[in-house]
Amino acid sequence: MTEIVDGEALAAEIREGVADAVEQFEGEGVTPGLATVLMEADPASETYVEMKQRDCEEVGIDGIHVEVDPDAPAEELHETIRELNEGTAANGILVQMPVPDHVDAQAVQAAVDPAKDVDGFHPENVGRLMSGEPRFRPCTPHGVQRLLADAGVETEGADVVVVGRSNIVGRPLANLLSRRADDGNATVTLCHSRTADLAAHTRRADVVVAAAGVPEMIDAEMVTPDTTVIDVGINRVERDGESTLVGDADFDDLEGYVDAITPVPGGVGPMTRAMLLYNTVKATREQTGVDVSLP
Ligand code: GUN
């Protein structure tokens, strides 16, 4: 039997814990705030940002949404970020990626106050993570760590193969899982589009994390019955004339074969959003000194 790892259920538990933390803040006269900033006119980004704002509302975080004209000069986005950095309403700031081509994404990430950088993308926070002292763990990698723990997958000594080397998922996750920590201590191999014989790596893995952005690329021939598959992919594809979402793992091929797998949707996606709320609470705690418990 393949365990279907339920990200919706775990995310709901974390949101409850966040709501408790928000109540503790309220008792001290503090309302945590999260600002989302959207510049790219992209339907998927618009949906993601709306969902993040809805999550804020559910747990009592003050959601602040700012849209910047996609054709405006980059300076307009920087001015928005400066105002949010300097103001007290937003404890966390998230600039939705991608940004338009004429805007330098790295400069944008570096412009966010690192104390409010709930994405964990600022170079200072990337450096802290690299040196083993993360302040804000990027939301998707943190969500994957929580899912593994919840599914009872021991990472210590495990062979983990991460497929995909993005700055948002693959690289920070490889770092976190190899860290000397209870939720780390894994032997991590970071594979990517130029890896020779990918299947030779995935077949000897205890855990495969599929985060390459390639629809259904991990199938049963690439894993064993003992493998846990964590699917980070969200790909919109046409199936039988209809648009549908699939992951980077071939769920239908793997269900019934592997030990455990996360579904798409309902696996990593909701966890990414839950960990953003977690980071917002953490940022608020550090900025205010009000010592609430984190879920
Ligand atoms: N676009 C896709 N994923 C992310 C994310 O985790 N954070 C931000 N800011 N933009 C994204």
Image: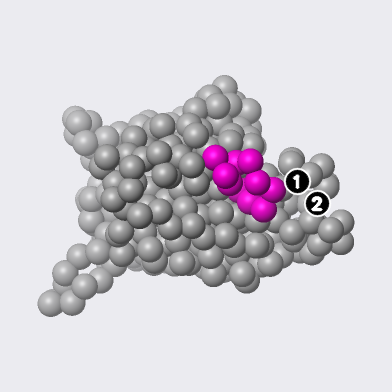
User: Which residue, as the protein is rendered here, is positioned at the far top?
Assistant: 131
Amino acid type, residue under disc 2 in the picture: Val
Residue displayed at 53% across by 65% down = 53
Q: Name the side, left or right, on which 124 lies relative to 280.
A: left
Q: Which mark is residue 285?
A: 1
* Number of marks drawn: 2
Marks 1 & 2, CB-CB < 8 Å contact: yes
Q: Residue at x 74, y 41 (%)?
A: 287
Quarter holding residue 261: bottom left
Asked if residue 48 lies left or right of residue 34, the reply is left
The N terminus lies in quadrant: bottom left
Check the image and report above or below for 9 versus 276: below
Residue 170 drawn above or below residue 253: above
Quadrant housing residue 289: top right
Instruction: Give the secondary structure at mark 1.
Output: helix
Q: Earlier in the sequence, mark 1 or mark 2?
A: 1
Which residue was labeled with disc 2? Answer: 292
In this view, the residue in front, 9 or 33, is 33
**Residue 269 position within the rendered picture, expressed as x and y whole percent measured from the top left:** 44, 59
